[in-house]
Amino acid sequence: MRNLLKAVALAFALATPFTSWAAGPGDGSPDSAQTCSQPAAPQAAGITWTNVPTQSLCAGGVAFAYRELGKRNGATPVVFLNHLAAVLDNWDPRVVDGIAAKHHVVVFDNRGVGATTGSPANSMEQMADDAIAFIKGMGFKQVDLFGFSMGGMISQEIALKEPQLVRKMILAGTGPAGGEGISAVAGVANYDLFRGLFTGQDPKQYLFFTRTPNGIEAGKAFLARLKERSQHRDKEIAVSAYVAQLQALEAWGRKQPADLSLIKQPVLVLNGDEDRMVPTPNSRDLARRLPNSSLVIYPDAGHGGVFQYHAAFVPTALEFLAR
């Protein structure tokens, strides 16, 4: 508890610069306002992750901010679930556009995050309940889930809570409840917040990528891609949401392991071979305990391996979803 309190205190001190680097300034434009809207008209040609409008859906008393691409592709929607301190603009455009080329992709801010209303949840279980409310509010009977980092933990909870809602899952840079090092994520994140603060770099350069020449260059390229959307950006995450997420990660890391054999859906598990945030052995543990899984480990890569290797990851994901 003492370490947790120290982490929370440090988060209050450092979360503002971190989220500023992570998300970029929102411009307060109507398409990211916290109101509910009707479904958008069919998308015109040329719409990509860098210019797709942000919409809002009311479900469970929350106005969820979301974006969707590839609706014309039909079939099972792919719902993206994001990482610690992330908002819509933290998704790699190459990954979103790549999967949306063949699938209906929906990306949203969970309760109290970014432009979504409400008080942020401080447990994975509540985040999963909120995600389920959003998915059902969209009218989806079944979805594929792509959960990155914390989003992968939420995805596991969704599959356990409502298995009929999930067709397939992609779990990247994540781990199971009670997994190795997960309760220490706050310490790792805040240490790299310090490093970013004192070096003038985005903390994700340290958190998501190795410190090898390849990792450093991949990090720079990823961060540049996150800036490609220059207008109508999402709102920055609030300090209260960041702290709530740290509490959720602490609890998840100390939770008793779940019976993952209950998850019968096909699952694609991916990570880099040197993940510092959610140590790579967690991915191997997931693949071992999930009865219908496959595992991909990228070399010379960290937590953001799927972003570093986006050119390889997207075809792998598309092939998996098409099976």
Image: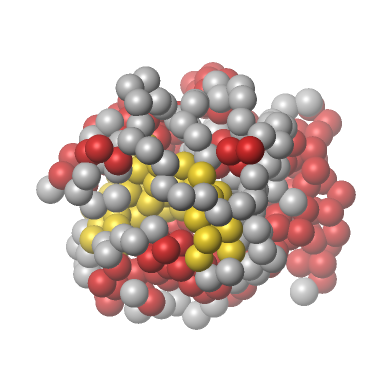
Left-right relation of 107 to 268: right
Q: Position of residue 74 (x, y in %)?
A: 22, 44
Q: Say whether residue 71 is visible.
A: yes
Q: Nearer the viewer, residue 255 or 212?
A: 255
Q: Say whether residue 184 is visible.
A: no
Determine the residue positioned at 37% across, 20% down: 46
Determine the residue positioned at 38% across, 66% down: 136
Left-right relation of 1 to 64: right
Q: Nearer the viewer, residue 289 or 267?
A: 267
Q: Position of residue 313 (x, y in %)?
A: 32, 34
The quadrant the N terminus occupies is bottom right
Residue 245 is drawn in which quadrant?
bottom right
Outermost residue toward the left in this view:
323
Determine the residue positioned at 74% across, 40% down: 18
Determine the residue positioned at 70% across, 32% down: 27
- Classify 296 as above or below 212: below
Q: Nearer the viewer, residue 35 or 152?
A: 35
Q: Position of residue 291 (x, y in %)?
A: 22, 67
- Classify 144 as above or below 322: below
Residue 271 is drawn in which quadrant?
top left
